[in-house]
């Protein structure tokens, strides 16, 4: 395979030609991008030839964090940026979406993959947008979805965005507690859902759960049903006295009127995504059209090196459920005119027939050029002894992406030893780390830099990322080099949240990201909640979460959500969970429970606890082990001491993290100290 010129190189050539800017290497380019924010982000707008229906003068109109004002006066629409590529990409012979599910792949090579052309994508988006408008969906209304990773979900999202309505989605494997914790906060006007889904060779009927959701969401006036498990599922079964029901197929039928995307102000809300903290409901994070478009194009093209002009057309796949921000990043491939490749189902086969080669066969048949997945996927392939090239043609593959947790050194070796070389060199591994919080990446790769095991190659363009030491009395921290510190971002980015939904005075927003550090002039500094080390090579290593958020296989979930599921059982009086991430080792998540007097944690109760978590949240958040304890460590104010227990189990001294005089029940500490000592010996 002959590789085209990397997009980061094309961008630098463009800067030299149009701006007179020359940089001696990536670090110099990064330094400029985080120093001259206005010039950098305006260059991204111009390089990607974004179009505004209204005039504007500057990229950064007021620098402050939070609350920076970007591209005032500009107007655009995420869906319009996608669909502007329809004619060119179609003329070049590229589909918009290639897709498959596990049932299709199980039929063998004789079963064709699904394809959605660019003109058909444009027609379905325009038709569904017009249908939703007829149902009364207006600019600013919330439309929520309970859909898997299938083309119809992309169509629905783009249709909602084209109207200026606000999108929010949950994966259908999420239970009612997790879904309602999210959707009930934003009072949706319409719900688009499947009747059920298939995973690991099993079908899961979601019609009873949909009725439960609708009963708890009185703001929903229209529900749209997409039969996925049972082709005969009837939408009218979901209708109610003040709620109409519609079949998805009827709203996208050929011949219906179509609507073109409407230009929106740069900071008009695009979607609401959720990132959970350790207390309260999940945080409903609002991102805007303009910021997401800029960040996605910068990340996808300049860092992941994915674009329509590479060779005979890139095909971008990142395995994800719709409950993970990587689904949003996968769909964002369409912004650059790239073909995206969607797989719906279990990448590991079934319980009876484990098969971690499933996604590699999909990548072969779809002609994937960039293959992405969570780090845990590669670890599972290694453990299962998968040989991706056995009986497969992966000759088009030129890059592998990983995120969700650190990629272990042995996984680098497995990838390099198992996948085809590109121009005589090991395949490029692009590890990224970012978050739902700002719909992007802080740390990533570029194809022009060397790859070092265990490291992400660079800090992203436009992301003023540092590792900070402990804050002083004024809240100021000092940058660290080759030492582990808190991941911070010292200057704003356009994709940072517009706000949290229903957050008076931005109290939760400020508390979530700006509670620890301040700049020299009192300015805000974003604290992300990860342990970070900037390496001498200029790369970066993430050592896991610095707070108590659960991050299982790349999907964050607040501990409060798990507690609601566990403590709903009458046997459970109290509980505490911590998620222990280790560089190069599997995540370990123990759950500690206090039971009613006289009860013992037996196998039956253990199973019930696990089932409660699986049903309310997801299978990803079932703990590794459950332990019965006498008491949960709490502060004098009654707060569970999640972070101190987590630090203790990660090797910190008990005297430094568990201040007994600040505890309401210091006598319970000894059990956890003994448990930590036992774990350290494993």
Image: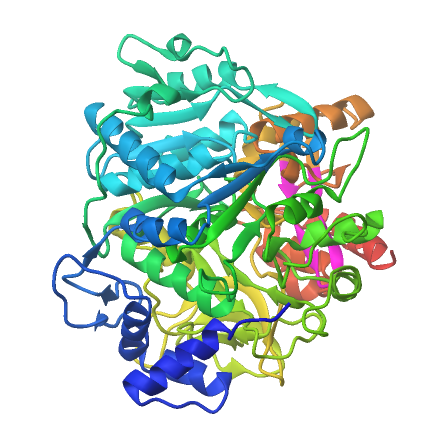
Residue 158's place in the image compared with 383, above or below, is above
Residue at figure coordinates x 19%, y 60% from the top left: 52
What residue span does the magenta drawing correspond to? 575-592
Q: Is most of the magenta stretch helix, strand or loop?
A: strand
Q: Nearer the viewer, residue 71 or 273?
A: 71
Q: Is 393 on the left or on the right of 446, as rendered? A: right
Q: Is 376 on the left or on the right of 101, as rendered? A: right
Displayed quadrant of residue 631: top right
Residue at figure coordinates x 45%, y 48% from the top left: 331
Image mark count: 0
Residue at figure coordinates x 79%, y 61% from the top left: 414
Q: Identify the residue at the far left of this view.
A: 55
Residue 434's place in the image compared with 118, above or below, is below
Residue 497's place in the image compared with 27, above or below, is above
Q: Position of residue 665 (x, y in %)?
A: 64, 46
Q: Nearer the viewer, residue 477 or 90?
A: 90
The reply to whether residue 239 is visible in this rendering is: yes
Query: Quadrant location of the C terminus?
Result: bottom right
Q: Is 403 on the left or on the right of 329, as rendered? A: right
Query: Quadrant location of the N terminus?
Result: bottom right
| Residue 121 drawn in magenta | no
Q: Is 103 on the left or on the right of 255, as rendered? A: right
Q: Position of residue 137 (x, y in %)?
A: 22, 30
Q: Nearer the viewer, residue 117 or 301?
A: 117
Indicate how the structure is coloured in the image.
rainbow
Residue 188's place in the image compared with 664, above or below, is above
Q: Position of residue 666 (x, y in %)?
A: 67, 50
The reply to whether residue 186 is visible in this rendering is: no
């Amino acid at each position: 395979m002959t590789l085209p010129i990397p997009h980061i190189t094309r961008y630098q050539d463009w800067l030299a030609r149009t701006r007179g800017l020359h940089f001696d290497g990536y670090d110099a380019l990064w330094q400029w991008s985080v120093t001259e924010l206005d010039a950098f982000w305006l260059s991204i707008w111009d390089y990607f030839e974004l179009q505004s229906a209204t005039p504007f003068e500057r990229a950064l109109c007021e620098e402050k964090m939070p609350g920076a004002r970007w591209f005032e006066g500009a107007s655009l629409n995420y869906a319009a940026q996608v669909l502007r590529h329809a004619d060119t990409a179609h003329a070049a012979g590229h589909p918009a979406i290639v897709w498959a599910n596990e049932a299709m792949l199980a039929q063998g090579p004789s079963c064709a993959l699904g394809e959605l052309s660019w003109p058909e994508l444009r027609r379905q988006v325009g038709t569904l947008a017009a249908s939703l408008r007829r149902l009364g969906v207006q600019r600013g209304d919330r439309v929520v979805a309970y859909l898997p990773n299938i083309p119809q979900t992309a169509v629905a999202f783009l249709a909602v965005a084209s109207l200026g309505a606000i999108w929010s989605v949950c994966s259908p494997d999420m239970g009612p507690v997790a879904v309602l914790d999210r959707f009930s906060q934003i009072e949706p006007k319409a719900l688009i859902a499947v009747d059920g889904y298939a995973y690991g060779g099993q079908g899961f009927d979601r019609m009873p759960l949909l009725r439960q959701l609708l009963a708890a969401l009185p703001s929903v006036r229209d529900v749209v049903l997409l039969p996925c498990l049972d082709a005969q599922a009837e939408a009218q079964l979901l209708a109610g006295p003040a709620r109409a029901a519609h079949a998805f197929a009827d709203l996208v039928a050929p011949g219906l009127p179509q609507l073109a995307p409407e230009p929106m102000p740069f900071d008009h809300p695009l979607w609401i995504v959720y990132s959970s903290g350790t207390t309260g409901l999940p945080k409903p994070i609002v991102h805007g059209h303009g910021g997401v478009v800029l960040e996605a194009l910068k990340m996808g093209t300049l860092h992941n090196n994915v674009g329509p002009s590479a060779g005979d057309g890139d095909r971008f796949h990142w395995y994800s459920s719709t409950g993970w921000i990587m689904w949003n990043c996968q769909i964002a491939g369409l912004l650059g005119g790239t073909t995206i490749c969607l797989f719906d189902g279990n990448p590991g086969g079934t319980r009876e027939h484990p098969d971690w080669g499933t996604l590699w066969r999909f990548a072969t048949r779809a002609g994937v050029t960039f293959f992405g997945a969570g780090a845990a996927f590669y670890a599972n392939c290694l453990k299962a002894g998968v040989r991706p090239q056995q009986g497969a043609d992966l000759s088009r593959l030129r890059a592998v992406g990983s995120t969700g947790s650190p990629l272990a050194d042995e996984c680098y070796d497995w990838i390099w030893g198992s996948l085809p070389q590109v121009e005589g060199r090991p395949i490029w591994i692009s590890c990224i780390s970012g978050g739902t919080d700002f719909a992007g990446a802080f740390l990533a790769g570029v194809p022009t830099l060397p790859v070092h095991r265990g490291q992400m190659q660079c800090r992203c363009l436009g992301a003023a990322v540092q590792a900070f030491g402990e804050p002083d009395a004024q809240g100021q921290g000092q940058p660290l080099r080759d030492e582990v510190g808190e991941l911070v971002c010292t200057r704003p980015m356009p994709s940072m949240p517009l706000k949290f939904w229903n957050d008076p005075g931005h109290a939760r927003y400020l508390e979530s990201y700006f509670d620890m550090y301040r700049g020299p002039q009192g300015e805000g500094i974003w604290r992300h909640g990860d342990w970070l080390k900037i390496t001498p090579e200029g790369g970066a290593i993430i050592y896991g979460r610095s707070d108590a958020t659960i991050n299982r296989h790349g999907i964050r979930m607040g501990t409060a959500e798990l507690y609601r599921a566990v403590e709903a059982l009458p046997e459970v009086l109290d509980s505490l969970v911590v998620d222990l991430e280790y560089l190069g080792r599997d995540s370990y998540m123990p759950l500690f429970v206090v039971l009613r007097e006289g009860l013992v944690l037996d196998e039956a109760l253990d199973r019930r606890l696990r089932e409660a978590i699986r049903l309310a949240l997801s299978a990803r958040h079932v703990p590794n082990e459950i332990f019965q304890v006498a008491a949960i460590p709490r502060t004098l104010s009654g707060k569970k001491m999640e972070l101190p227990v987590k630090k203790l189990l990660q090797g910190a001294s008990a005297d430094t993290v568990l201040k007994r005089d600040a505890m309401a029940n210091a006598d319970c500490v000894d059990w956890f100290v003994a448990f930590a000592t036992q774990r350290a010996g494993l």
